Image (tube, rainbow, N blue to C red):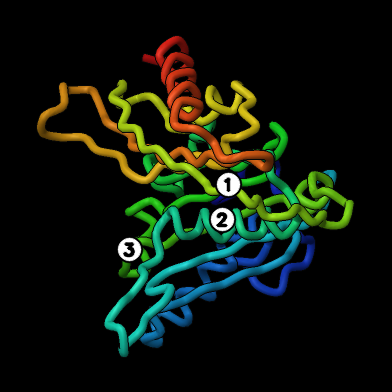
Amino acid sequence: QKFALDKFPLVQIINPLTKDRSFLRPSTIPSLLDVFNYNFSRKLEDVFLIEIGKHYSENSEVELISGLMHGQYLSSAWQKQTIDTDFYLVKGVIERLFNDLLIDNYRFKRPETIINELHPGVAAQIYVNETLIGMIGRLHPEEENQYGTSHIYVFEMNLEKLFNQSIKNQKRYLSISKFPRVSRDLALVMDSSLEAQSLLDSIDGLGMNTLKSVNVFDVYQGNHLEEGKKSIAMQFVFESQDKTLETAEVDNLIKKIINKLEDDHL
């Protein structure tokens, strides 16, 4: 029952070919780890796997899409640059899939139930339109030790739920604004337990048509901050389809954002 989001009775096979394959799998991730182990033990360190397959319970068969990533995602000997796999890279791969499926109302939340095989501080559950569809995370160090490496990242999502949340309409063309964008950066000091997602939710609740994007680009804890506090740096990008935004207008929007965050969280 490793990596299963829900614990339920396993489906036993009456005449299994081998003893270690006596049950139908409740998760596809152990299968991916077997493939990873086969490759890693043969000196292939950069391993990226994806599978579409089923998991089974007593009452249903559910098709899943799952993946495993480990090692250097990109490497350029010419430019002497590398990009190592981490949680945010894997999260970006999933977000790219959502973008292709025209899914925008998604979020990554701290797990409500602990998955023992995942790192307790590097894991999240994936929601689309408030529907739980899967999870993402780094393997627990005790799990990683079995493979003689670290920083193994996995994800698993319910494919049927994912398609049900996808917008079926064709993509619509939206003309690029003729007017310049304006960006502002803010650094907000708050309790270290406060999640960045809760700030984004508050900002989204303001319904600002000219606010095109909000990006968290830095989180700091350490010197010059009180114990139990952290600083989150956010970039806000504003743009109008109708006119050039004046400095005073942007200042007023930033003031509304600050007031909203102070009222809700600070």
Q: Earlier in the sequence, mark 2 or mark 3?
A: 3
Q: Tell me the tag on residue 135.
A: 1
Residue located 37% across and 80% down the image: 75
Q: Earlier in the sequence, mark 1 or mark 2?
A: 1
Q: Position of residue 116 (x, y in %)?
A: 45, 43
Circle 1: residue type? Met
Total marks shown come to 3
Q: Where is residue 54 in the image (x, y as percent from the top left)?
A: 75, 60
Picture quarter with the C terminus? top left
Determine whether 183 is above or below 250 in the image: below
Q: In this orientation, which residue lies closer to the viewer: 253 or 144?
A: 253
Q: Would residue 64 appear left or right of 123 to someone viewing this image?
A: right
Q: Where is residue 156 in the image (x, y as percent from the top left)?
A: 62, 54
What secondary structure is marked by label 1? strand
Q: Tell me the tag on residue 58.
A: none
Mark 2 burial class by Cα count in 10 Å: few <14, some 14-19, many 20+: many
